[in-house]
């Protein structure tokens, strides 16, 4: 399927979804929001894909909303409609049933920063920049930032980043736990793809169950989490992948997981 604002590539059980509006630093216009939803549906329907890598073209990840479309005044209803479309994308990406890795080079600001936080793992280049810059143009936070950011860096740091609109560099993002890894820009793709291949080699069913449980943990108590673990382990222990993993352990060879 062809897209105006995205590139989709599949290789080695990894699907790469590239935001492709480099002339606008990959700003999230309405077309891109709709196309990302369609692309995620397309990727989920491919049983060979085990990991998704999200990135941006042209040396930047995503500049957030397209400010050029904001010159004309919008009504409250129009503004809400734009964000509700973004909300669908946030929920889809956070709950996507396969591990997701965002590969960030350059700017990830505004909704672009929060889009990165929708992914399971964040790998950044040493020239990456992150920021909740909404207040600079008189906007409230969107893209799930009020929910995602405090869970990653804590409420105190989230308040500071949101209230100041400061843009932080990759080293500071790593220090506060916003990203998983920072690597030299020249090594960003190689490191990210090595991580994706490592994850893709693991049992797909178990990882899908793990992601579901981790996502639900924030809204669950311990008893509820334990119940979900017992249910999930029941599915995993009856799987062919578990039998393969045990056989590989005793035969002293790498396991070959199939997702069944």
Image (tube, rainbow, N blue to C red):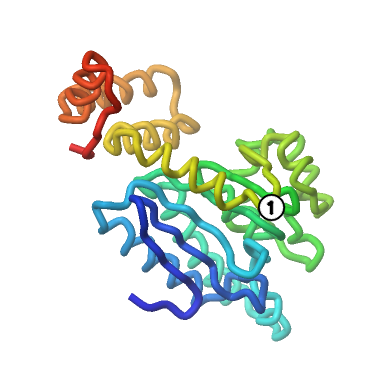
Residue 157 position within the rendered picture, expressed as x and y whole percent measured from the top left: 76, 38
Residue 3 position within the rendered picture, expressed as x and y whole percent measured from the top left: 42, 77
72 or 113, which lies in front?
113
Q: Is residue 191 left or right of residue 171?
A: left
Residue lying farthest top?
A: 250
Q: Is residue 173 left or right of residue 112?
A: right
Residue lying farthest bottom?
A: 72
Does 28 appear above or below 191? Answer: below
Residue 242 position within the rendered picture, expressed as x and y whole percent measured from the top left: 21, 24
Does 39 appear above or below 94? Answer: below
Does 71 appear above or below 192? Answer: below
x 64%, y 39%: residue: 181
x 66%, y 57%: residue: 105
x 52%, y 76%: residue: 30
161 or 72, which lies in front?
161
Residue 75 position within the rendered picture, expressed as x and y whole percent measured from the top left: 63, 79
Q: Quadrant of residue 28?
A: bottom right
In the picture of the structure, the residue carrying the numbered disc 1 is: 185
Q: Secondary structure at mark 1?
A: helix
* Count of numbered marks: 1
- Alpha-carbon neighbours of circle 1 within 10 Å: few (<14), some, or many (≥20)? some
Which quadrant is home to the C terminus?
A: top left
């Amino acid at each position: 399927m062809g897209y105006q604002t995205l590139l989709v590539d599949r290789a080695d059980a990894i699907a790469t979804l590239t935001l492709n509006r480099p002339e606008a630093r990959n700003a999230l216009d309405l077309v891109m929001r709709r196309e990302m939803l369609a692309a995620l549906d397309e990727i989920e329907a491919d049983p060979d894909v085990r990991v998704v890598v999200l990135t941006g073209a042209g040396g930047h990840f995503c500049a957030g909303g397209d400010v050029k479309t904001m010159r004309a005044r919008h009504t409250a209803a129009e503004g809400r409609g734009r964000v509700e479309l973004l909300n669908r994308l946030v929920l889809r990406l956070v709950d996507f049933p396969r591990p997701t890795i965002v590969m960030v080079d350059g700017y990830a600001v505004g909704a672009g920063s929060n889009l990165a936080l929708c992914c399971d793992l964040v790998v950044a280049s040493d020239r990456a920049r992150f920021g909740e810059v909404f207040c600079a143009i008189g906007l409230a936070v969107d893209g799930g930032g009020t929910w995602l950011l405090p869970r990653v860096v804590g409420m105190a740091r989230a308040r500071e980043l949101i209230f100041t609109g400061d843009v932080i560099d990759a080293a500071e993002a790593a220090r506060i736990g916003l990203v998983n890894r920072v690597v030299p820009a020249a090594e960003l793709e190689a490191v990210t793809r090595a991580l994706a291949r490592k994850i893709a080699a693991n049992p797909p069913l178990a990882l899908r169950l793990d992601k579901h449980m981790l996502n639900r943990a924030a809204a669950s108590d311990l008893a509820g989490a334990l119940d979900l673990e017992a249910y999930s382990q029941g599915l995993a222990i009856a799987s062919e992948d578990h039998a393969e993993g045990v056989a590989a352990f005793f035969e002293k060879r790498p396991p070959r997981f199939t997702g069944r």
